[in-house]
Image: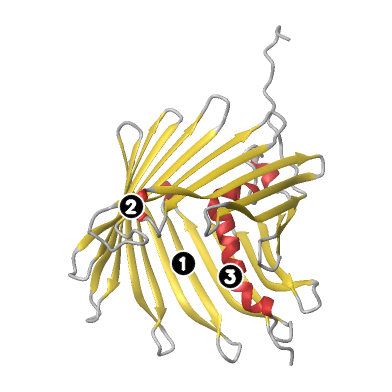
Amino acid sequence: MRKPTANIRLVHALLLAVGAYFCVGLEVFAQTADSQTTDQANKSWTATTDFNRKNVNPMRMIESHRQNGNRTVDTRSVEIPGSDGHFEHYQDIERETLQVDATTARITTRTFCRDVNRRKTLVDVTEEEKHTGPGGDSKIDRITSASDLNGRLQPVRREIVETQNTDMDMEETNSTVMLADGNGGLAPAIKTRELRKRAASDTVETEKTTWLLDVNRNWQVNEVRHATTRQEGTNRTTEERLSRLDSQGKLREVSHVVVKESESASEEKRSVVETYSIDVPGTAPDGSLHLIERKTSTESLSPTGERATDKKIEQVNPGDPSSGLRVSVLVDGKMVPGPLGERSTVTIRARDVNGNFGIVSVDTTTSDRIPTIQVQQTPAGKP
């Protein structure tokens, strides 16, 4: 029997690194460019990303998109170096979408891993069916099954989401999550209700309440998330406040996030996200909200279709929390389209223990997606 390699033991950290990769604003390079038309986005493509991180074994991710009539298949494969140094599959995720008719869609997501003998093994399946009714009402039934010790799939989670438009300016979404109860069945464990209301002056108010079961199996409010979005021309501001149940059984505000987005006449986009929290690294909680992080990002698109992104992350220094925020991560990205597809490069620099910035990652993505560049038409009679 083949023993797991050190790469296998590191794979969870690598997969988290992939998540961090997209969380720092680089999803623009992994998704269809904004300049593409809907028809172009539906065509088949394949993209390969090589992750090269300092002091971490390399990893490769291969994504593909295939569409045939009313059936679409998206796959994502993660590869890591094997004992011989060559890349080999570690995890595969396949997502199949079937548009049954105008009101019904079925989505099946399958996750495969490799066992110690490198055999492809199905570890979980999520089956989702969505029905859309008149007026935008919808219902989603999502069931997740995981393999047990004998390799048999057993239901471990079910989620039912129902959305109704109560009037022209109000939308209500209720969801119930059922988890395994230990007796071979599923029992309700989480409930949420989200109210979304469109107000005057291009303002949208959203309130989401989450209930959990207490020790007596009674529903109790666990958290309330309230968000307000205001649109003024090309500028948009979103404020989100999160309150959670404290040790005394009372709801208490624990975080406040402010997002400011803008777009210039030259189509340059800018975003600033500030996070306030009662938990400040390096200090004991004092019950007040403090600014702990600021993310600033810009995105520009050239007339030839080249897309550039820059991101700066400022955080509290745990060693000196009273000194305010300091820059901790810098991200530079560039996507260049070509006649055969796109090529992207992302460079991530981080501050080390000595306060100096060094390159921790240089990731490259090649794709055979061919973007449709929207060229501005010159008015007649002008050069």
**Residue name at image x 45 percent, y 48 percent:** 326
- Residue designated by label 3: 13
Kindly report which numbered mark, 2 or 1, lies closer to the viewer in this rendering. 2
Kindly report which numbered mark, 1 or 3, lies closer to the viewer in this rendering. 3
Q: Tell me which label, 2 or 3, sits earlier in the chain.
A: 3
- Residue 44 shows in this picture: no
Residue 175 x %, y %: 37, 64
- Residue designated by label 2: 322
The quarter in which the C terminus is drawn is top right
Amino acid at the residue labelled 3: Ala
Residue 243 x %, y %: 27, 58
Q: Nearer the viewer, residue 98 or 115?
A: 115
Circle 1: is it few (<14), some (14-19), or many (20+) Cα within 10 Å? some
| Circle 2: element type | helix
Q: Nearer the viewer, residue 198 or 262?
A: 262
Q: Tell me which label, 2 or 1, sits earlier in the chain.
A: 1
**Residue name at image x 33 percent, y 63 percent:** 192
Q: Is residue 6 left or right of residue 276?
A: right
Circle 2: is it few (<14), some (14-19), or many (20+) Cα within 10 Å? few
| Tags 2 and 1 touching, CB below 8 Å | no
Q: Residue furthest top?
A: 381
